[in-house]
Image (cartoon, helix red, strand yellow):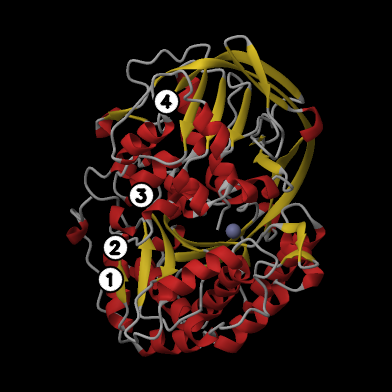
């Protein structure tokens, strides 16, 4: 799953779903046989290869990732899938711009009543590279804009009554307590960047707060600066999510964030409490900020791997169920205990292995499902959902032909699987699909237990959502009928000790490949149901995402 860094710095009830009925095909021998083709040993073997030290953490644009991509393509070919990338190959080359901030030459100075305070990089602040310029400057008064969220349709606007024109806007991580997926949507840095630019702001100061400090400590943010910033380039060579009006951005540590309120008539504690209680607060701060940023730019490219299995229905085979999983991970980074390779076994060699297992299961079916199935091993997820976003913008098949996306990122196979979480499924008829598959496999479907983690915008399904395609991020649930097994504790412990650490490798204890196979079978059933149902999945009536991005 995507790191927080890119999200931070610089920059409904279930209705309408009942119209979608699922065919009673689940007891089929064909389905049983296909599901049996998904094997724990096979998942283990694929993960072992993909997360091997020799692949050096599969960093986007690196040789290790290229080898992983070749491996995926070879496997797809061996399984008998057709190439569905560019020019009859399994690959879609994604043009990328790699940006590193020059820490020694990047400065943030805060000026209060003529007194200058020069902040120290990685101690009080960090900044990311600028994908559009090698050098930029800004000097402007600072206004505090709460969460930096403008959502008048939800009755919430941090920019209300605030003049942000020509100012630097300072805001907190996250969004008000809208329901899970909307909270995630409004927490996105891209959305906040667009909103700031639309209000005439010239820079952004992202602030730390006690809640964020707990889930993503500043120290870790500073450490993660070692990884470069990447953006995909459009056909005109412009980086995605780039607003030239926003000249500079920086992320301040907790102490400096609190100090921003000095002389404003409000204390940091008062503001944090009010905001947490859902009460918007925006006001000018008693300071000016001077930011100077220098960046090094380099254009590179990295492949998505795309393969298809043709459907059996003469008309529906022109439509696709799209399975995705990110193949990239963080590559080589800061050493920990002498280990600098970020292997990404669970994140996300696990999902990549599942893609192959799903391909094997579907390939066994004769006849194949009615719709075609597309398998996309995307690149650049960790750097900002880049491969999937590029693919969703420039798909190698017709955009309207994609009926749904099922994304698999981080199968935490660390406890017996009893339930499934389908992040975002409640926004479309995919919820019914999950429930049907769950019933068949005796797995319950649970709501998002961790809305503060904004999972719905932190993996590749979000790229498809933004193109109007109903999507779901599958995840093992956190239920346990055995009081001695506490999935939430295991999950939290994994997040702190192994998520985005070199120790997310095949030596970690507790990997349960049998549970992983069960999970993959569930994912198979979901895609199978969508592929066979005449009606394509649809956003719920009046759904937020359907209205904002959907065309149907
Ligand atoms: Zn990740």
- The quarter of the picture where residue 64 lies is bottom right
**Marks 1 and 2, how far apart at CA:** 6 Å
The residue where tag 4 is placed is: 145
Q: Position of residue 523 (x, y in %)?
A: 43, 72
The residue where tag 3 is placed is: 181
Answer left or right for 375 relative to 535.
right
Front in this rendered view, residue 359 or 339: 339
The local crowd at label 4, few if under 14, some if 14 to 19, many if 20 or more residues have their Cα within 10 Å, is: many
The residue where tag 2 is placed is: 431
Q: Earlier in the sequence, mark 3 or mark 1?
A: 3
The local crowd at label 1, few if under 14, some if 14 to 19, many if 20 or more residues have their Cα within 10 Å, is: some
In which quadrant will I find the C terminus?
A: top left
**Marks 2 and 3, how far apart at CA:** 14 Å
Vertically, is 83 above or below 78? above
Q: Position of residue 467 (x, y in %)?
A: 45, 43
Q: Nearer the viewer, mark 1 or mark 4?
A: 4
**Marks 1 and 4, how far apart at CA:** 40 Å
- The quarter of the picture where residue 89 lies is bottom right
Q: Is mark 2 within 8 Å of ligand 1?
A: no
State yes or no: discs 1 and 2 in contact (Cβ < 8 Å).
Answer: yes
């Amino acid at each position: 799953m995507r790191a927080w860094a890119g999200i931070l710095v610089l920059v409904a009830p279930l209705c309408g779903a009942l119209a979608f009925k699922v065919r009673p095909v689940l007891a089929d021998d064909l389905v049983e046989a296909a599901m049996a083709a998904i094997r724990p040993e096979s998942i283990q073997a694929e993960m072992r290869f993909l997360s091997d030290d020799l692949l050096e953490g599969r960093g986007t644009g690196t040789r290790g990732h290229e080898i992983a991509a070749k491996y995926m393509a070879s496997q797809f070919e061996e399984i008998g899938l057709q190439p569905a990338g560019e020019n009859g190959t399994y690959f879609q080359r994604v043009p990328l711009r790699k940006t590193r901030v020059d820490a020694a030459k990047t400065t943030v100075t805060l000026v209060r009543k003529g007194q200058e305070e020069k902040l120290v990089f990685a101690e009080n602040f960090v900044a990311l590279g600028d994908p559009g310029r090698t050098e930029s400057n800004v000097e402007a008064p600072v206004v505090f804009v709460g969460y930096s969220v403008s959502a008048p349709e939800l009755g919430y606007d941090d920019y209300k009554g605030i003049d942000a024109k020509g100012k630097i806007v300072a805001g907190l991580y996250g969004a008000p307590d809208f329901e899970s997926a909307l909270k995630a949507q409004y927490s996105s840095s891209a959305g906040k960047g667009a909103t700031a630019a639309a209000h005439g702001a010239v820079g952004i100061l992202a602030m730390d707060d006690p809640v964020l400090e707990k889930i993503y400590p500043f120290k870790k943010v500073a450490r993660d600066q070692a990884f470069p910033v990447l953006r995909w380039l459009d056909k005109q060579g412009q980086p995605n999510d780039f607003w030239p009006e926003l000249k500079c951005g920086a992320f301040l540590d907790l102490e400096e964030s609190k100090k921003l309120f000095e002389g404003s008539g409000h204390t940091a504690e008062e503001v944090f409490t009010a905001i947490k209680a859902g009460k918007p607060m925006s006001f000018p701060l008693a300071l000016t900020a001077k930011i100077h940023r220098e960046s090094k730019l380099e254009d590179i490219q990295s492949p998505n791997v795309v393969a298809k299995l043709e459907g059996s229905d003469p008309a529906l085979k022109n439509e696709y169920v799209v399975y995705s999983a990110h193949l990239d991970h963080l590559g080589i980074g800061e050493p920990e205990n002498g280990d600098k390779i970020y292997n990404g076994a669970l994140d996300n060699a696990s999902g990549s292995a599942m893609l192959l297992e799903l391909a094997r299961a579907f390939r066994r079916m004769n006849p194949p499902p009615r719709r075609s199935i597309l398998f996309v091993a995307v690149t650049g997820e960790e750097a900002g959902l880049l491969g999937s976003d590029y693919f969703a913008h420039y798909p190698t098949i017709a955009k309207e032909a994609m009926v749904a996306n099922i994304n698999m990122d981080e199968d935490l196979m660390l406890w017996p699987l009893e339930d499934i979480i389908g992040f975002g499924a409640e926004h479309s008829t995919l919820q019914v699909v999950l429930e049907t598959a769950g019933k068949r496999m005796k797995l319950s479907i649970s709501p998002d237990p961790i809305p503060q983690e904004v999972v719905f915008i932190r993996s590749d399904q979000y790229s498809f959502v933004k193109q109007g395609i109903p999507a779901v991020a599958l995840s093992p649930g956190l239920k346990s009928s055995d009081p001695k097994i506490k999935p939430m504790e295991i999950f939290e412990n994994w997040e702190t000790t192994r998520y985005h650490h070199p120790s997310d490798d095949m030596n970690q204890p507790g990997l349960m490949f049998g549970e992983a196979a069960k999970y993959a079978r569930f994912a198979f059933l979901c895609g199978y149901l969508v592929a066979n149902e005449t009606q394509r999945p649809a956003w719920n009536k009046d759904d937020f995402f359907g209205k904002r991005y959907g065309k149907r």
